[in-house]
Image: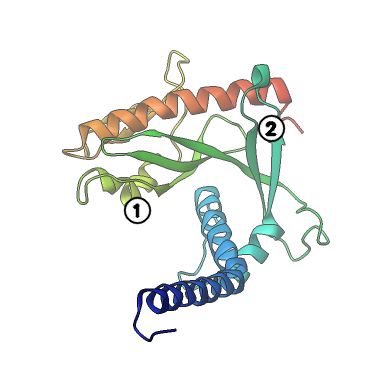
């Protein structure tokens, strides 16, 4: 076979491609479990943050997952009319005696569920947690957004998340939803939250999907008896 001829070049290229593919496949198999655990831990961190648990910033994936299993129970309920199942995370008070490797036990401190919709630039996804009364916000956390830094991306800021705590999920007339008002404006209704200045579209999007997702959760909670045990 003539060196540097077409056949040689073709064989050499194929050989390099196959070797490179095998290396990538090996590395992927080697790292896939770790990547999966890290992604799962990142989601568990956001769920626990919404439920009010305090986590160290440098907590490892193993630590996060172990603590999640000790204090949070995941429940899945069939969706209405064959729709998408509803996943609810029940948070329990932390004790020295977790549920023996099966389930947490003790008093329920809150119920968390997914919220999200289309923002100004792309999807927004998060977790909202309610107190056991299912009427008061315990916490909220957004783990995905493509909003403008310094504007809509402020939904991830601590001040914005804190603004939801203790707010009601219905107005004085009983309508489900959260209202946004200019930041620092007083007085506020029981369901009013500080808005993000200059991010009207993001704020409107958050308001719309919270109305929808809170309403859907409350309807499911009534049908499934969530919060009544």
Q: Residue furthest left?
A: 198
Q: How many marks on residues?
A: 2
User: In front: 34, or 127?
Assistant: 34
Say what secondary structure mark 2 lies in: loop
The answer for how far apart the CA atoms under marks 2 and 1 are is 28 Å
The residue lying at 22 percent from left, 39 percent from top is: 183
Q: Is residue 51 visible?
A: yes
Quadrant of the drawing holding the C terminus: top right
| Residue 143 position (above or below residue 203) | below
Q: Is residue 165 visible?
A: no
Query: Where is residue 120 shown, x and y percent of the image?
Result: 26, 35
Quadrant of residue 125 in the image? top left
Q: Which residue is mark 2?
A: 227
* Residue at horizontal 18 percent and vertical 39 percent from the top: 197
Foreground of the two, 225 or 23: 23
Question: Residue 158 has which mark?
Answer: 1
Q: Is residue 79 above or below residue 141?
A: above
Work out which residue is located at the far front of the displayed protein and give it: 1
The image shows residue 146, relative to residue 172, as above or below, that is below
């Amino acid at each position: 076979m003539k060196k540097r001829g077409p056949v040689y070049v073709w064989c050499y290229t194929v050989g390099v491609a196959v070797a490179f593919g095998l290396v990538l496949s090996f590395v992927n198999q080697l790292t896939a479990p770790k990547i999966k655990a890290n992604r799962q831990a990142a989601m568990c961190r956001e769920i626990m943050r919404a439920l009010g648990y305090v986590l160290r910033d440098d907590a490892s994936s193993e630590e996060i997952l172990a603590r999640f299993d000790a204090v949070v129970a995941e429940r899945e309920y069939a969706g209405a009319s064959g729709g998408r199942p509803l996943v609810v995370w029940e948070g329990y008070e932390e004790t020295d005696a977790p549920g023996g490797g099966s389930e947490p036990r003790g008093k329920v401190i809150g119920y968390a569920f997914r919220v999200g919709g289309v923002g100004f630039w792309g999807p927004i996804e998060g977790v909202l947690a309610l107190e056991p009364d299912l009427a008061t916000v315990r916490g909220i956390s957004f783990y995905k957004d493509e909003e403008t830094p310094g504007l809509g991306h402020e939904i991830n800021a601590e001040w914005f998340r804190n603004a939801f705590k203790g707010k009601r999920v219905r107005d004085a007339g009983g309508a489900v939803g959260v209202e946004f008002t200019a930041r620092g404006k007083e007085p506020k209704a029981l369901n009013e939250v500080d808005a993000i200045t200059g991010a009207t579209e993001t704020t409107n999007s958050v308001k719309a999907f919270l109305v929808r997702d809170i309403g859907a959760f409350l309807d499911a909670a009534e049908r499934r008896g969530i919060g009544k045990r």
